[in-house]
Amino acid sequence: MLQQDIAELDMLIDEILLMSRLDAGSHVDLSGTLDLVALAAEEGARYENCQLSGEAPDIPGDATLLRRLIRNLLENAHTHAAPPVEIEIAYAQGIVTLTVSDGGDGVAEADREKVFQPFYRAPGQQNVKGYGLGLPLVRQIAAAHGGSVEILPRRHERSAIRVTLPLAPAES
């Protein structure tokens, strides 16, 4: 029990420090390129009932941060939703989209922006595992890569979060 508590505390401190660095405008190295599909496949393989579809060219980015982004989205789907979880990657007009969908109830429209605030808990979610930092980190990581994140309206019995990333780094 003590080891689990220490591990959870370490994870919380790590997430707070990462949020702080990103908030402070810590430089994210976008000089390299990476295969987002391969990263998503690796992260998706950690979960049962997780499927990946789509393709995209390599994108500029920090592999560690984008891995964290994908992991947070998948962890969120597995904690708050129902299987199966699907990852869909697509690209068009210089933009790559990564959409994680699941069979959960989704996020109420009134809470769609609030869930990106650190430590926010939607009504009825106070006793769910986690600290409310996963989605705020997703937003910060996407922004550090010149992208964005949004919660999509629930359709066809699926809830979804979409991350949009540019195929080329933004000019400074």
Image (cartoon, grey):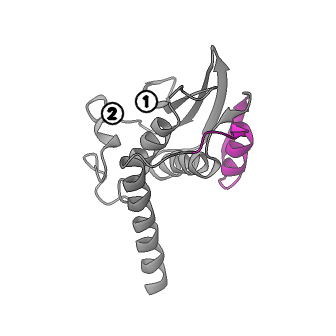
Name the residue: 52% across, 23% down: 156
Name the residue: 37% across, 55% down: 20
Q: In the image, is residue 8 part of the stretch drawn in magenta?
A: no
Cβ atoms at labels 1 and 2 below 8 Å apart = yes
Above or below, 135 relative to 98: below
The image quadrant of residue 14 is bottom left
Name the residue: 35% across, 53% down: 132
Name the residue: 66% across, 50% down: 43
Mark 1: few, some, or many residues within 10 Å (few <14, many ≥20)?
A: some
Range shown magenta: 29-54
Mark 2: few, some, or many residues within 10 Å (few <14, many ≥20)?
A: some
The spot of residue 6 in percent (x, y) is 44, 79
Q: Which of the two residues, 37 or 129, is positioned nearer the viewer here?
A: 37
Residue of label 1: 150
Residue 129 shows up from this direction: no
In the image: residue 147, left or right of residue 126: right
Mark 1 or 2, nearer chain start: 2
Residue of label 2: 112
In the image: residue 108, left or right of residue 45: left
The spot of residue 55 in percent (x, y) is 74, 28
Q: Which of the two residues, 92 or 42, is positioned nearer the viewer here?
A: 92
